[in-house]
Amino acid sequence: MPFSMFSAALVAALVGFGSTIALVLSAASALGATSEQTASWFLAVCLATGIGSAFLSFRTKIPCVLAWSTPGAALIAATHGISLPEGVGAFILAGLLIALTGALRPLSRAIGLIPDGIAAAMLAGVLFPLCVKLSGLAHDTPKIVLPMLAVFVLVRLKNPSVAVLCALATGVGVAMFTQAGPELKLHLAVPKLVFLWPELRMDVLLGLGIPLYLVTMASQNLPGFATIRAAGYTPPVRAALGLTGGLSTVAALFGAHTVNMAAITAAICLADDTHPDPKQRWKVGVVYGVIWAALGLLGLTILQFLAAMPPAMLLALVAIALLGPLTGALSGAFSTPKTRFAATATFVVAASGVAFFGIGAAFWGLLAGLMVYFLETAWQKYA
């Protein structure tokens, strides 16, 4: 196996894991997960990602790589008043809906009816409150946050895919050599899967489960399939949705949120430099899956390390990591004039964070945008 294949898989796995691990940690904290439950969350989602990537790549002979749902983690991190067992119920619903989308054509058609601009605006509304905290963090802890921002901006000019990792390394380095430096006491231990009985609350299922499904489909799975298609392969849409939905459902029982097709990290694995023969390039997905499984087994040590870091550094890393997705979401939300006002309505409501009847703002933002869109469409058609 060429070394280029291993290096591509390693870089892709580290970029996907390292650039958003703090975001997943924030999501677990928002649901009140204990340290054992958080470790179980990481192990389950990493194993699901690794197993799914290796199996799908081997079965289809196409380099198919998975990742955890980054916008889904952002959505979870922005929630309030939800317990982890209630979150597990929402995760299971999202996983089942993803699997059903692959199995039932009418459901996939229904998702296709949601305009891209409105789906992007919902994601932007979820991400915006998290990103806007960056200014306050820079004001309160400038010695840590400002160097992270400077490195992120400069590295991004040359290589955007590793800019967040460089910001993380900068934050760790500054924290280690300032008064905020942590006392590291790391213990090598393998995390354990902790089974969680789901608690079903209708408002949580509607306010978290359905938006989690929608942002995962619109912001991760669809771009992931497009990335595979752009590389010259025919993406296995139905098989991939069935597998990722099934894995997400099982992983949810151990506290993990959804897994999905990767887009940015997939582009690394699909590059021509990975292997000169496109028919052999699928092997990178197997290597990628093994690396993700290894990261899951090291999750407890990684979490111990992150727990020793200053909270401001982790919050700043979350905000920095989401600047790219926010840029893409805002661009998609307002690129089409026909849906621009409906997207604005979606963004404003989703970014407000206001919950009605216990249902989160993301759901109401989507509903508001769809109402405005169909009202405008009907008026233009019949007026």
Image (cartoon, rainbow, N blue to C red):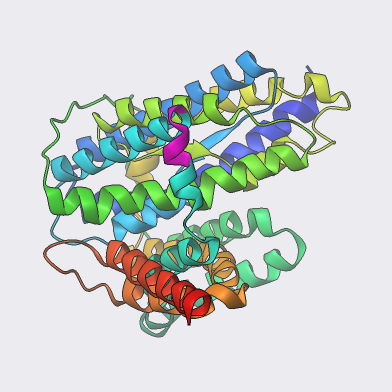
> Residue 156 placed where, x, y %?
68, 65
The quarter holding residue 127 reads bottom left
Which of these two is toward me, 171 or 125? 125
Residue occupying the point 76% across, 24% down: 281
Residue occupying the point 61% across, 14% down: 59
Q: Is residue 294 above or below residue 212?
A: above
Q: Is residue 176 inside the magenta stretch?
A: no
The quarter holding residue 265 reads top right
Which of these two is toward me, 22 or 176? 22
Residue segment shown in magenta:
103-108
Horizontal side of 297 relative to 147 (left or right) equals left
Q: Is residue 226 above or below residue 127?
A: above
Q: Main secondary structure of the magenta part?
A: helix
The quarter holding residue 147 reads bottom right
The answer to whether residue 183 shows anywhere in this view is: no
> Residue 169 placed where, x, y %?
55, 56
Residue occupying the point 68% across, 59% down: 160
Q: Is residue 328 above or below residue 349?
A: above
Q: How many marks?
A: 0
> Residue 173 placed where, x, y %?
51, 60
The answer to whether residue 195 shows anywhere in this view is: yes
Task: Name the residue at the top extreme.
Answer: 59
Horizontal side of 265 relative to 189 (left or right) equals right
Quadrant occupied by the N terminus: top right
> Residue 383 placed where, x, y %?
48, 82
Q: Is residue 106 inside the magenta stretch?
A: yes
Task: Name the residue at the bottom extreme.
Answer: 139
